[in-house]
Amino acid sequence: MTLINGTCVAINGQGVLIRGPSGSGKSDLALRLIDGGASLVSDDYCQIGLKDGVLTLKAPPPIKDKLEVRGYGIVKLTALAFVSVDLVVDLINDSEVDRIPDSNTCFVEGIKLKHLVLNAHTPSSAAKVRLALQITPDSF
């Protein structure tokens, strides 16, 4: 398994990999999704694996069941053992977000996945993640 920088949650069994630089809001977006019913898989780093053409993520043992809440500290939450990845969310500055992107897919480890680019600090960011899970892109 490969270690990647990112946070992962599951929404109704669908895995969401949240990527972005330090301070971009990965853990904060994950917390808002968890508050809305999602389950934690891993915060900050994920072990990524590929089995039978399916990309899976799980927490490295030292950080399993932990979520960083900025301004509060590290909290213990029961995390899922692993999840298959259904959506990749890349976090960028609001001014860089395309209103209508050219593509809503990306490749991770050679696997084509749904892709969403957004600013985590936008009030609608959690709703956009949930919506993206429900929609099949035209390019899929």
Image: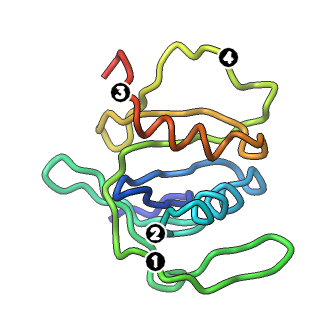
Q: Which residue matches tag 2?
A: 41
Name above or below for residue 140 compared with residue 26. Answer: above
Crowd tier of the residue under label 3, counting other residues whose Cα lies within 10 Å: few below 14, some 14–19, many 20 or above: few
Q: Residue at x 30, y 60 (%)?
A: 49
Q: Earlier in the sequence, mark 3 or mark 1?
A: 1
Disc 3 from disc 2: Cα separation: 23 Å
Instruction: Please identify the residue farthest to the left as the structure is shown.
Output: 52
Task: Inspect the image, locate mark 2, and give the three-letter code of the amino acid beneath it.
Answer: Val
Q: Residue at x 44, y 56 (%)?
A: 11
Q: Earlier in the sequence, mark 3 or mark 2?
A: 2
Residue 50 percent coordinates (x, y)? 24, 55
Q: Quadrant of residue 33?
A: bottom right
Q: Which residue matches tag 4?
A: 99
Q: Earlier in the sequence, mark 1 or mark 2?
A: 2
Crowd tier of the residue under label 1, counting other residues whose Cα lies within 10 Å: few below 14, some 14–19, many 20 or above: many
Q: Which residue matches tag 3?
A: 136
Task: Inspect the image, locate mark 4, and give the three-letter code of the amino acid beneath it.
Answer: Arg
